């Protein structure tokens, strides 16, 4: 019987840069020389003539930990110096550390924790942070640290300083699971990790409180949700995932809110999963998703 492969020897290689001939051949040759076996390779070019090139490669290399320094040297030499590409290596078994922010709504937060506990989301949940104490008892059974950080509207910076104290060096991703506070540009610059947000797709048509009641008044036929990376421009960051569900004229505003919550859970879970599996490449204000 063959020995089971070591999960630590399964690796993702991400590449981006200006498209030009020979990139795929260079990567394949380099990995072959290293003794690696490619299990999947996805690529995309925004334009073969001077566009941006993106590639996600998953490979297996026995003894990767020992081989890594030499492999990285060759990647620098042939891809970075030789072809002007940016690259990164990450063992599949090295899970991203995630902090989840929430307020009073629990549907997205608890769904992520439940999927994580079932092994459906490849990540480590480092902490939950909330501007309310309401959800602490809901989170307790998951054995995840819960930090209550109130936000004083007259001094938001105090809360952000506390957030940064908790996050720095401890997380690779922040997820806003219906966190109902504005994220400032200063926080985004200092946290130095991506931030993913979920919102109902009524924005910007139904801004403000009671979006589902407003949607009911307008007689909408579809409701949905959008997960995106957070930028300084409110709700304008690169979109990762979206979905919709059809509704009926007889649905109440409460029906719309319930069905909207279902969509929000699914969309956010997919976005977080894809990010944690390195399937998302940012291209300006849009994204390339390798599925």
Image: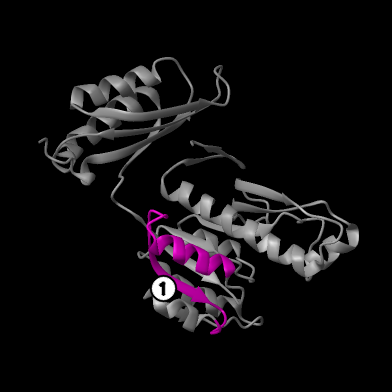
Side of 92 relative to 61 (left or right) = right
Q: Which residue is mark 1?
A: 166
How far across and how far down the image is residue 144, in percent? Answer: 39, 74
Which SS class for mark 1? helix
How far across and how far down the image is residue 247, in percent? Answer: 78, 54
Query: Is residue 242 depicted above or below 254 in this figure?
Result: above
| Label 1 CA crowd tier, 10 Å (few <14, some 14–19, many 20+) | some
Q: Nearer the viewer, residue 118 or 286?
A: 118
Residue 116 within the segment the image draws in magenta: yes
Side of 39 relative to 184 (left or right) = left
Side of 278 relative to 259 (left or right) = left
Side of 30 relative to 284 (left or right) = left
- Residue sitting at 33 percent across and 39 percent down? 12
Q: Quadrant of the N terminus?
A: top left
Q: Nearer the viewer, residue 242 or 171?
A: 242
Report the magenta residues as a range: 107-134
Residue 234 visible within the image: no
Residue 21 visible within the image: yes
Indicate the quadrant where residue 7 lies.
top left
- Which residue occupies the extreme top position in the image? 21
- Residue sitting at 39 percent across and 16 percent down? 22
How far across and how far down the image is residue 137, in percent? Answer: 48, 83
């Amino acid at each position: 019987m063959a020995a089971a492969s070591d999960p630590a020897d399964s690796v993702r290689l991400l590449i981006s840069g200006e498209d030009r001939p020979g990139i795929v051949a260079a990567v394949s040759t380099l990995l072959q020389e290293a003794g690696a076996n490619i299990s999947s390779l996805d690529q995309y070019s925004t334009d073969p003539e001077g566009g941006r090139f993106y590639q996600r490669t998953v490979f297996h290399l026995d003894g990767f930990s020992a081989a890594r320094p030499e492999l990285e040297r060759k990647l620098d030499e042939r891809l970075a110096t030789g072809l002007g590409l940016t690259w990164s290596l990450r063992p599949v078994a090295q899970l991203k550390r995630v902090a989840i922010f929430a307020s009073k709504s629990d549907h997205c937060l608890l769904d992520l924790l439940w999927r994580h506990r079932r092994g459906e989301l490849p990540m480590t949940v480092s902490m939950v942070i909330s501007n309310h104490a309401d959800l602490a008892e809901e989170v307790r059974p998951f054995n995840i640290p819960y930090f209550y950080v109130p936000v004083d509207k007259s001094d938001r910076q105090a809360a952000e300083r506390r957030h940064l104290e908790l996050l720095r060096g401890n997380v690779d991703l922040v997820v806003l699971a219906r966190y109902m506070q504005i994220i400032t540009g200063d926080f985004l610059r200092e946290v130095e990790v991506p931030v993913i947000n979920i919102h109902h797709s009524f924005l910007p048509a139904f801004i403000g409180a009671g979006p589902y009641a407003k949607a009911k008044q307008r007689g909408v036929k579809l409701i949905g949700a959008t997960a995106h990376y957070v930028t300084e421009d409110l709700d304008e960051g690169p979109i990762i995932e979206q979905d919709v569900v059809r509704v009926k004229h007889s649905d109440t505003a409460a029906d719309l809110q319930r069905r909207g919550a279902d969509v929000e859970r699914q969309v956010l879970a997919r976005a977080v999963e894809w990010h944690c599996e390195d399937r998302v490449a940012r291209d300006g204000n849009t994204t390339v998703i390798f599925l």
